[in-house]
Image: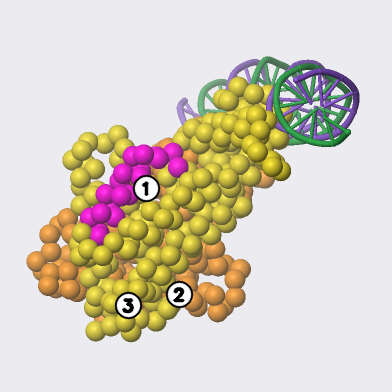
Chain colours: A orange, B yellow, C purple, D green
Amino acid sequence: MSHTFGIRQAQKQKTRQALLDAALGLLEEQSLSSLGLREVTRAVGVAPTAFYRHFRSTADLGVALVEEALGSLHPMIRTTVTTADTGEERITRAVELIAGHVNAQPAHVRFIARERHGGVQPVREAIREQLGRFAEEVKAELAKDAQAKGWSDDDLLMLSHLYVDQMLITASLFLESLEASPEERERISRRATHQMRLISIGRHHWLD
Amino acid sequence: MSHTFGIRQAQKQKTRQALLDAALGLLEEQSLSSLGLREVTRAVGVAPTAFYRHFRSTADLGVALVEEALGSLHPMIRTTVTTADTGEERITRAVELIAGHVNAQPAHVRFIARERHGGVQPVREAIREQLGRFAEEVKAELAKDAQAKGWSDDDLLMLSHLYVDQMLITASLFLESLEASPEERERISRRATHQMRLISIGRHHWLD
DNA sequence: TGTACATCAGTGAACGCGCGTTCACTGATGTAC
DNA sequence: TGTACATCAGTGAACGCGCGTTCACTGATGTAC
């Protein structure tokens, strides 16, 4: 075999992941543009210079974090939009899915919300590209629906972006409420559900 | 008089404003959490220690910038929502207003978009509070409308937040397109208008 | 109006500290025979 | 299987630099009489 994963590769991968994890933790309380390379290596317990074996810079690490945070979400989103229940059930499921994901991966969600408009250009670009892919995927699913009859491509994409942006807003509200009361979280769920519903109603009557 | 603005007060105000302006300029390319006090004073041409005569920290300066960026927008938003044309004209006007504001104050808009989820807690809090006020004000205007009959308070606020968030998303899209072609900017305008229209349609049929 | 004292915005030297980056290195892992 | 050499992830010392903060100061402006 040309390269059965040897001990060396495995160990390198492990250190790389430790750097990513440590950075993600540190980024809960600061922005990427103020994250120091020495901070990250100190948190992992390796020499500062080890950082360069894995990333050119903290910006480079940031781009890797975007991939980690959003890359695995594509199938998740696709299946949620696809599921052919009534619209109402789909909305409930989507909001629950977002709440669940924020609970499971708060640091990832915070990172994306923070750096989407943050001070590091390549990271903004990477996030923008992933969100654009989400919108395209949602559009592809919407296009399959009977309701899409008579819709222009542009308008389908317009609607997809509306949904994707709305999901992100909802995620960031759940994030802020992580330590709030169950009542507060319920209030956020309800509002997000209503907003999604209102958009879906607009969608139904778009061609009237 | 207890304090007719003397030369001293005026000069102090001028330096303070120079610090705010310089910071805003520097923040076009980085986040507040990485902005240095010495950077700011260097840009203005005063000693680093002069900074402390005006702000406790860069976070404190950030809170002042939030006030500067959003404080003056309240009347603007109120009159835009109020104007009693057809809904369609109101939407067009709102999108034009956003595009115009982004052109006139790009640095302010970028700062708000960036720091809304940024790494500095007091600044996030200040932005959250201002946006909350916007939503309350929009809600108050919507409540006056005949269309609001039968709407619960909660649902009016749900809709206001949807509008406010949508405005912010549109502003940030215009921001990213500042150096793009007129065609690209037109495309963004059109999509934003359609999204607003779809939301308004949802609003019309909400109680069906 | 003139004088004597108080205020306070901005100064400049000094401090200790952590930063990113360079470099030659070490020693475990991988490879060729 | 055993040996000799190559690779390369992680090390540790060293560097120059800019940072935030302290302190005692200066001199123009403000105030009281």
Q: Is residue A30 above or below residue B21?
A: below
Please state the extent of the stretch shown in magenta in the rendering. Answer: B90-108
Q: Seen in the image, is A116 located left or right of residue B36?
A: left
Kindly indicate whether the residues beneath marks 2 and 3 are on one polypeptide chain.
no
| Quarter of the figure that contains the C terminus of chain A | bottom left
- For disc 3, the neighbor class at 10 Å (few under 14, some 14 to 19, many from 20) is some
Chain bearing tag 2 is A
| Quarter of the figure that contains the N terminus of chain A | top left
- For disc 1, the neighbor class at 10 Å (few under 14, some 14 to 19, many from 20) is many
Q: Which mark is residue B148?
A: 3
Tell me which amino acid carries mark 2: Ser
2 or 3: mark nearer the eye: 3
The one nearer the camera, D9 or A44, is A44
The one nearer the camera, B100 or A2, is B100
Question: What residue is disc 1 on?
Answer: B172
The residue located at (57%, 67%) in the rendering is A178
Magenta run includes residue B138: no
Total marks placed: 3
C-alpha gap between disc 2 and disc 3: 23 Å
Tell me which amino acid carries mark 1: Ser
The one nearer the camera, A170 or D8, is A170
Percent x, y of residue A39: 65, 40
Q: Seen in the image, is C14 located left or right of residue B113?
A: right
Percent x, y of residue B20: 56, 36
C-alpha gap between disc 3 and disc 1: 29 Å
Magenta span dominant secondary structure? helix
Q: Seen in the image, is B96 located left or right of residue A193?
A: left
C-alpha gap between disc 1 and disc 2: 25 Å
Question: What residue is disc 2 on?
Answer: A189
The residue located at (26%, 72%) in the rendering is B202
